[in-house]
Image (cartoon, helix red, strand yellow):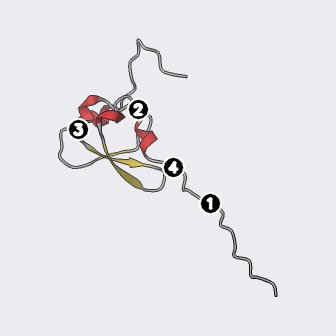
């Protein structure tokens, strides 16, 4: 379910105050929307374990911040090599 249009996009106010500094912006707010003022800024997004560095590009505007820092590790079962029977 999306947010109603009259409310506008959700954006954490703390990100606005940190936006003027040159250092990467460290955030836990994964539900905030990426706005054009964050263009070409470096965000450090917390994924539950560590911070992942993301550079904001024009294609990311309008998406949620959390979409670019995956929270689950990639895992795949591997097949064991079977020895040939003689």
- Upstream in the sequence, badge 2 or badge 4? 2
Q: Nearer the viewer, mark 2 or mark 4?
A: 2
Mark 1 neighbour density, 10 Å: few (under 14) some (14–19) many (20 or more): few
Badge 3 vs badge 4, beta-carbon distance below 8 Å? no
- Upstream in the sequence, badge 3 or badge 1? 3
Residue identified by numbered label 3: 19
Residue identified by numbered label 4: 71
> Could you tell me which residue is drawn at 38 percent across and 31 percent down?
33
Question: For this view, does 14 lie left or right of residue 82?
Answer: left
Q: CA distance from mark 3 to mark 2?
A: 18 Å
- Upstream in the sequence, badge 4 or badge 1? 4
- Upstream in the sequence, badge 3 or badge 4? 3
Position of residue 49 relative to residue 7, above or below, is below
Q: Identify the secondary structure beneath mark 3.
A: loop
Residue 2 is situated, as x and y percent measured from the top left of the image, at 50, 22
Q: Which dot marks residue 63?
A: 2
Q: CA distance from mark 3 to mark 4?
A: 24 Å
Q: Nearer the viewer, mark 3 or mark 4?
A: 4
Badge 4 vs badge 1, beta-carbon distance below 8 Å? no
């Amino acid at each position: 379910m999306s947010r109603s249009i009259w409310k506008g996009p959700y954006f954490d106010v703390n990100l606005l105050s940190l936006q003027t500094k040159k250092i990467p912006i460290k955030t836990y707010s994964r539900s905030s929307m990426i706005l054009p003022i964050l263009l070409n800024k470096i965000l450090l997004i917390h994924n539950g374990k560590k911070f992942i560095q993301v550079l904001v590009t024009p294609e990311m505007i309008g998406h949620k911040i959390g979409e670019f820092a995956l929270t689950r590790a990639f895992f795949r079962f591997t097949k064991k090599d079977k020895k040939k029977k003689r």
